[in-house]
């Protein structure tokens, strides 16, 4: 068996398949041949049976002829009828032909032929007896009778009778022998049929058995080796190269000479090569990871340096510019005003350069993110026109804006970055234009949902061969341009990258000496709204009537503090100063402030930490504006996550400050907290949690929540839903109460009641039920009671936030998150 399997493993796949096919085919041929021979034998035996039957039939015919002769003879003698004589003569005439035919038929059996010859001899003897008496009879009736008269009488002892009896005896023996042959040949035919049946049955079983054994052996041998290849390939697919190589290291699997052996050997070589390459790649990847970490550290160091540099430069620069502005505003001497103006212009120029460098660095590091908010287009146009109009006027050129966007249209995008793009393009146009005009063209291409900005100047223009390079960093059309007009060469590079971030494109058309046209096309969404008096006022940019706010400025730099205080006092605010976060927290604990302006980098406690403390520990909703020299997104986002309402960069700009103030107090009004920026102050307010009776909260004692103490994720889901719903319901309660909308107030109170009842908050439920009944009956609800309901909701919101924080920590701990 071993020799067979060894031989099988060494033959080619083609021979293997032919072998597997040849074995069953050979067996089928053997069985078919055997069946064929048996069938032929069966047919031969059946032929001999038919042949013997015919022989018996002819012998019986001869015997019948003898009987007819005897019958005819006796009939003629007894009746003297010619009909009997005719039968005798007919039988006598038919005898020679019949016996000759029978003799030829049994010529394969000499014994029977001899017997027939003997019978024929006896018949001739008998015929000679007759012929001695008379000639052969004619066919006439009289002659037949005459013939019969001369036939010897058939007496018992006559010679005629003896011959006749012997003929009949021999014919009977002949028939008996032939019948024995029939039985013998029938048995032989049956044996042939049985052999055919046995051959078919046992041959088929043998074919099935041997073919199955061959197939099983072949498939086992092939599958055993192919399985190794498959397992090894799967291991290699999963990058378990070492395991794949180990599986193929058994040389017995490819020590043979067939194609599988060759394939296995080649695959083994490939696996070894891949293993070596993978090890080399892993080594290089580790080196790359190390280099990546170094690069990331270098990038972080660069970012930290730029952030620190930004803060360290902006902080004193803010003080310089702020004091210069104060001196300019307070001085009456022309020379002092002129000098302070020069300081302001130089400082602003330095600030612009610093902003360009920092913005470009953020874009290069993919750290610049775009905000999405709806804004009026004038919000990006006016911050450009106001500072640049004077610059254009000083150069003797006109600056015009063609705003073709309807004033009731609000655009969705990053307003600040769009302002930066427009400012850079317009500033560049004014810088390189000595006569003529600069035109800003703004419109919406509604068919393609595009916002189009065009800045057209009549300046020096740009040569065609230089146009491709002007969007590169630190590049201008010519070195003489830098000497004559100044600049860093970053403005257009920043514009190009910002446009790409917004998924738009910028086009340039320019002829040297005739001017340039920069066209920016941006995909933009917008919406239209009905014009309100407030919108009309904003679009006309009237001076804002600021309320009398009590402001706390937190800054460790005394100069910056003085500048910010002067800025706020000019707006009519009362101001107090704190040198760091700790002092600010102490002051907020003792006094109420409407606004906190918070610096970031301070000793003892920085601005982000202080903001966190105000929101989490003091539970104060005081408006906080971050006020920082940091220009990178990380500290800005950290401030917002801590709870700041807005982030302002140093030095303070009145427009950005006004925008932030308007937005913050508008949100407070929407939340039902009241807004000191409006004259109609509602009597219902959202008081700080620290000024409410915290002991009245019911959420922590809720039986439903206590039963879910171990289901942290479920607990968080329920409490967050309640907190969010309560927050959304408070403004609805205030608005429907002020508008005397009983149906709306009833609906809001019903929602409060349902949530309170589901968590077994009995006091809140009872108060909500009382107020809901009044709303159903269209009765007026006392402001004090509604204020009490809102206070209870606020307390439970605060406790809900605390429950969510604790449950989140437990959930993270369960998940193994630090």
Image (cartoon, rainbow, N blue to C red):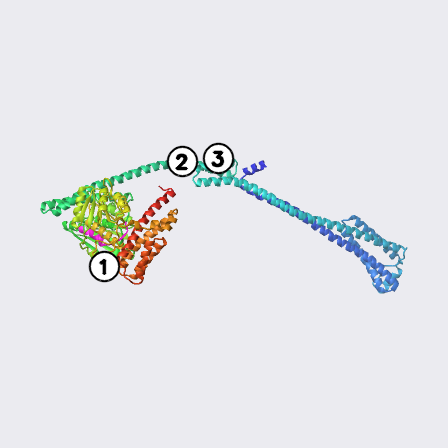
In the rendered image, which residue does mark 2 sit on? 279
Tell which circle, 2 or 1, labels the residue nearer the N-terminal end.
2
Query: Would you call the spot at circle 1 few (<14 residues within 10 Å), some (14-19), or many (20 or more)?
Result: few
Residue 693: image location, x then y, percent? 28, 50
Query: Would you call the spot at circle 2 few (<14 residues within 10 Å), some (14-19), or many (20 or more)?
Result: few
Residue 272: image location, x then y, percent? 44, 36
Q: Is residue 485 above or below residue 667?
A: above
Reply yes or no: does residue 385 show up in magenta.
yes
In the rendered image, which residue does mark 3 sit on? 249
Q: Within the image, what quadrant is residue 737 found in?
A: bottom left
Tell me if residue 161 can be seen.
Answer: yes
Marks 1 and 3 in Cβ contact (< 8 Å): no
Tell which circle, 1 or 3, labels the residue nearer the N-terminal end.
3
Q: Which quadrant of the rendered structure holds the N terminus?
A: top right
- Nearest the viewer among 397 and 444 is 444
Q: Within the image, what quadrant is residue 682 found in?
A: bottom left
**Which mark lies nearer to you, 2 or 1?**
1
In the rendered image, which residue does mark 1 sit on? 532
Kindly report the distance in space between the C-alpha atoms of the residues bearing marks 1 and 3: 83 Å
Q: Is residue 811 left or right of residue 141?
A: left
Q: Within the image, what quadrant is residue 448 found in?
A: bottom left
Which range is magenta?
A: 371-386
Element at badge 3?
Answer: loop
Query: In the image, which disc is placed on residue 258?
Result: none
Q: Is residue 683 left or right of residue 164?
A: left
Element at badge 1?
Answer: loop
Kindly report the distance in space between the C-alpha atoms of the residues bearing marks 3 and 2: 18 Å
Marks 3 and 2 in Cβ contact (< 8 Å): no
- Nearest the viewer among 309 and 56 is 309
Tell me if residue 475 can be seen.
Answer: no
Reply yes or no: does residue 319 show up in magenta.
no
């Amino acid at each position: 068996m071993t020799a067979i399997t060894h031989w099988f493993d060494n033959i080619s796949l083609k021979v293997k398949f032919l072998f597997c096919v040849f074995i069953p085919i050979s067996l089928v041929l053997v069985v078919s041949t055997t069946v064929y021979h048996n069938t032929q034998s069966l047919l031969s035996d059946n032929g001999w049976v038919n042949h013997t039957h015919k022989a018996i039939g002819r012998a019986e015919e001869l015997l019948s002829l003898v009987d007819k002769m005897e019958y005819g003879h006796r009939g003629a003698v007894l009746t003297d009828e010619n009909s009997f004589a005719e039968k005798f003569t007919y039988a006598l005439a038919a005898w020679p032909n019949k016996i000759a035919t029978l003799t030829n038929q049994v010529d394969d059996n000499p014994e029977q032929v001899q017997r027939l010859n003997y019978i024929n001899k006896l018949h001739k003897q008998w015929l000679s007896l007759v012929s001695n008496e008379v000639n052969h009879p004619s066919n006439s009736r009289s002659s037949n009778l005459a013939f019969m008269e001369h036939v010897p009488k058939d007496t018992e002892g006559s010679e005629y009778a003896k011959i006749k009896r012997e003929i009949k005896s021999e014919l009977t023996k002949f028939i008996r022998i032939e019948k024995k042959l029939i039985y013998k040949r029938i048995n032989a035919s049956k044996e042939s049929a049985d052999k055919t049946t046995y051959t078919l049955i046992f041959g088929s079983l043998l074919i099935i058995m041997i073919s199955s054994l061959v197939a099983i052996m072949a498939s086992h041998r092939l599958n055993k080796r192919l399985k190794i290849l498959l397992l090894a390939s799967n291991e290699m697919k999963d990058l378990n190269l070492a395991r794949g190589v180990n599986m193929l290291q058994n040389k017995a699997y490819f020590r043979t000479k067939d194609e599988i052996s060759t394939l296995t050997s080649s695959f083994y070589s490939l696996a070894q090569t891949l293993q070596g390459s993978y090890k080399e790649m892993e080594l290089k990847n580790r080196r790359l990871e190390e280099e990546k970490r170094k690069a990331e550290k270098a990038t972080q160091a660069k970012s930290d340096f730029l952030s620190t540099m930004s803060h360290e430069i902006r902080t004193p620069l803010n003080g310089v510019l702020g004091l210069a502005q104060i001196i300019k505003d307070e001085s009456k001497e022309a020379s002092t005003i002129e000098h302070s103006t020069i300081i302001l212009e130089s400082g602003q120029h330095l600030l612009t350069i610093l902003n360009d460098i920092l913005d470009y660095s953020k874009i290069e590091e993919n750290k610049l993110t775009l905000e999405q908010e709806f804004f009026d287009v004038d919000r990006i146009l006016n911050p450009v026109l106001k500072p640049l109009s004077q610059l254009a006027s000083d150069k003797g050129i006109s600056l015009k804006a063609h705003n073709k966007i309807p004033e009731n249209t609000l655009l969705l995008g990053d307003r600040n970055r769009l302002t930066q793009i427009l400012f850079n393009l317009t500033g560049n146009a004014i810088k390189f234009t000595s006569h003529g005009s600069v035109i800003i063209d703004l419109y919406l291409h509604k068919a393609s949902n595009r916002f189009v900005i065009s800045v057209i100047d009549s300046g020096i223009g740009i040569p065609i061969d230089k146009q491709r390079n002007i969007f590169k960093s630190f590049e201008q059309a010519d070195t003489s341009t830098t000497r004559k007009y100044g600049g860093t060469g970053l403005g257009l590079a920043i514009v190009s990258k910002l446009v790409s971030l917004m998924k738009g494109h910028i086009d340039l058309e320019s002829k040297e000496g005739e001017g340039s046209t920069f066209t920016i096309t941006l995909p933009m969404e917008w919406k239209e709204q009905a014009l309100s008096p407030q919108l009309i006022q904003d679009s006309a940019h009237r001076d804002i009537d600021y309320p009398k706010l009590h402001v706390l400025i937190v800054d460790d730099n005394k100069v910056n503090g003085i500048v910010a205080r002067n800025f706020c006092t000019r707006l009519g605010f009362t101001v107090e100063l704190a040198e760091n976060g700790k002092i600010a927290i102490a002051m907020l604990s003792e006094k109420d402030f409407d606004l906190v302006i918070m610096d970031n980098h301070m000793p003892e406690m920085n601005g982000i930490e202080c903001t966190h403390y105000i929101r989490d520990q003091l539970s104060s909703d005081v408006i906080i504006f971050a006020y920082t020299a940091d220009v990178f997104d990380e500290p800005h986002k950290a401030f917002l996550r801590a709870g700041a309402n807005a982030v302002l960069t140093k030095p303070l700009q009145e427009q950005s400050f006004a925008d932030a103030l308007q937005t913050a107090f508008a949100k407070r009004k929407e939340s039902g907290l009241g807004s000191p920026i409006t004259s109609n102050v509602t009597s219902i307010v959202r008081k700080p949690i620290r000024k409410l009776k915290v002991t009245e909260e019911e959420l922590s004692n809720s039986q439903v929540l206590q039963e879910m103490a171990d289901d942290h994720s479920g607990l968080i889901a329920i409490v967050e839903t309640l907190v969010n719903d309560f927050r959304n319901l408070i403004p609805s309660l205030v608005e429907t109460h002020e508008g005397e909308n009983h149906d709306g107030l009833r609906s809001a109170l019903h929602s409060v009641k349902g949530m309170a009842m589901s968590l077994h908050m009995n006091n809140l439920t009872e108060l909500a039920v009382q107020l809901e009944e009044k709303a159903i009956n269209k009765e007026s609800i006392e402001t004090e009671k509604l204020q009490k309901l809102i206070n209870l909701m606020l307390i439970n919101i605060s406790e809900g936030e605390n429950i969510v924080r604790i449950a989140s920590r437990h959930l993270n701990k369960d998940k193994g998150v630090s």
